[in-house]
Image (cartoon, helix red, strand yellow):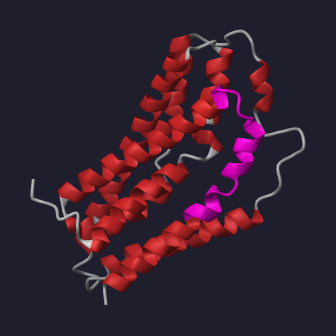
Amino acid sequence: MADVDLARPVLASLLAAGFAAAFLHAALPTHWLPFVLVSRAQKWSAGRMLAAVAAAGAAHVATTAVVGGLLVAAGLALDPLLGGVLPYLSGLLLLGFGAFYLARATMRRPLPAGGPAGAPGMELTEPQVSNRAAFLGLVAMLAVSPGEVLLPIYLSAAQEGLTVLALLTLIFAAGTILGMTLLSLLARAGASILRLERWARYEGAVLGGALIVLGLLVLAHQH
C-alpha cells in the first residue's frame, strides 16, 4: 500500500468528516433502539447485546463499502468522458444530501405524547423467538441497508487510491459501531428512550450541516 499523507488538510478533513458522519448517522433510532428492545425481550446480557451491535454495525458498513466501491468504480470510469467533473460531482452530492437531511429535520413531525414508535415493546418479558434468530435478525436489519449518507464521501475520496478508501471504511466502522454502542448502553442503563429519540431528532440537522460543510470544502479544493 502506498503511503498516505494524513497531514494534508483536505484528506484530514475528509477522514474526520467521515467519522463524524458515521457517528451521527448511528444516532438514528433504527441503529440502536431495536437492540435495546430485543435484548430486554430476550433477557440478554449487556455483552450479548453489544455483540449484536458490533456485528450489525460491521455488516452495515460492509454493505456500504460494497456499494461505495461500485460507485467509485463507475465514477472513475465515467470521469474521463465527463471532462474531470468527478470531484465537483462528489461535492454537489454532499451538498444535496446535506440539504435533504436539513429539510427532512425541519419538516419532521413532533413525537406523539405516548412515546416513540415501538416503545411498548419495552414491556415484553418473555422471548418471542430464539436467541439465534433474534441476533441474526438484528444483523440482517442493517446489513440489507447501506448507509446512503456515507456514499458521497466515498466518491469524494475516489481519486485518493485504495489505501484512503480502505482507511475511510475503517473510520466509518469505528464511528458507526461507537455511536451505536454508546446509545444502546445509555438506553439499557435506564436513560429515557423518549429523551434519546428526541435528541436523535436533531441528528438530521447536525448531519446535514456537516455534509454541507464537507461539500463546500471539496468544491473549494478544486479551485
Residue 127, position as x, y percentages in the image? 67, 10
The residues colored magenta run 187-207
Residue at 54%, 19% in the rendered image: 46
Q: Is residue 166 left or right of residue 50?
A: left
Residue 186, position as x, y percentages in the image? 62, 33
Residue 175, position as x, y percentages in the image? 43, 47
Q: Is residue 21 left or right of residue 68?
A: right
Q: Quadrant of residue 35?
A: top right
Q: Look at the picture and state if 219 lies above or below 93.
A: below
Most extreme residue toward the left, as rendered?
2
Q: Quadrant of residue 45?
A: top right
Query: Can residue 6 be seen in the rendering of this structure?
Result: yes
Residue at 65%, 26% in the rendered image: 189
In magenta stretch: residue 205: yes
Residue at 76%, 65% in the rendered image: 107
Q: Look at the picture and state if 1 lies above or below 100.
A: above
Q: Quadrant of residue 217?
A: bottom left
Magenta span: predominant SS is helix
Most extreme residue toward the right, as rendered?
113
Residue at 39%, 36% in the rendered image: 58
Nearest the eye: 1 or 187: 187
Quadrant of the frame with the C terminus? bottom left
Nearest the eye: 164 or 89: 164
In magenta stretch: residue 66: no
